[in-house]
Image (cartoon, helix red, strand yellow):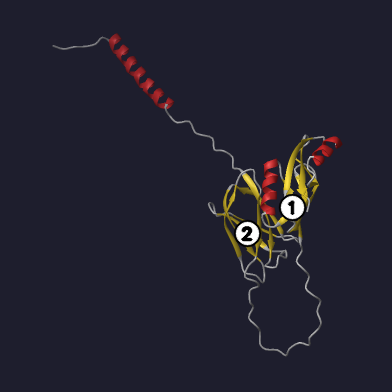
Amino acid sequence: MQFGFSAGRRAAVAALLLGLSWGSASEARAQEPVPTPTPSPVTTQLTGQVEDESGAVVPNASVTVRNLTTGVERRTVTNSLGQFLVSGLAVGEYQVKVDVAGFRTEVVDRVQLRPGALQTLMIRLGGGPVPVPSPEPVPPPVPVPSPSPPEAPDFAVFDWKASAEEELRQLLESVTAMGWGLVSVIPVGNQRGFFYFEKASGASCEIVKQSEPATVEQLRRQIAQRPKMRLAGMHRLNATEGLWIFRSKE
């Protein structure tokens, strides 16, 4: 016995199979994963000061900052006050290396840079000057009286930029932990100021947030509430917020 389909029935079966194939392909496309946007990188900055064993600042020292994950390096040199600043660094773990003629290389490993925080380092070159081989013996020079060596500076000035109260608080705590005390602050526009420190001053700091523009009466009230402290200065965050910085009296 033979079975057959009419032309109309064969067309209906073909249409049904075609619909099933199209539905399976559509379902497979619907299950494909949606690509996730890649977040933009977050950058931060690193600042610090380089000194020798006596506490004297070291200018023109070569500073190399290397990302321990990517191996990318950034280089700069210290200014006349021994300070350096490297900005635009990706958040992560770094190695900081300091080279200067006449001293051994100093390396600081595993420096953590976090978003929204300015990391500050105080680097002291240890080991003293690198000994240099003596040339052939020469007749001793005629002794000439020389002036006494200059004393190591007992002050430091930092040009800092802080956009939030907590960021400024971390900066002050990191420097005072190294034996420096805040003396005064000179605002230089929004989020930036000159911070003057002295060694071994032992002064503690207090930060008071204040809406701008402030009034004289507000400042008098804040000073009266702190009889054991004096006003060191102010740091302006923006057009509507500022920070008054008080330091303890010695």
Q: Is mark 2 on a helix, strand or loop?
A: strand
Task: Answer with left or right where residue 67 lies relative to residue 169.
Answer: left
223 is higher (above) or lower (below) than 198 = above
| Residue 78 coordinates in the image, percent (x, y) | 71, 60
Amino acid beneath label 2:
Thr
| Residue 15 coordinates in the image, percent (x, y) | 34, 15
Gap between marks 1 and 2, in whole Å?
33 Å
| Residue 196 coordinates in the image, percent (x, y) | 78, 53
- Which quadrant of the rendered structure holds the C terminus? bottom right
| Residue 193 coordinates in the image, percent (x, y) | 77, 47
249 is higher (above) or lower (below) than 8 = below
Residue displayed at 65% across by 70% down: 103
Q: Where is residue 208, by image quadrant?
A: top right
Residue 164 seen from this side = no
State the residue lying farthest toward the left: 1
Residue matched to label 2: 64
Q: Which mark is residue 220?
A: none
Q: Where is residue 124, by image quadrant?
A: bottom right
Front label number (1 vs 2): 1
Residue displayed at 63% across by 62% down: 98
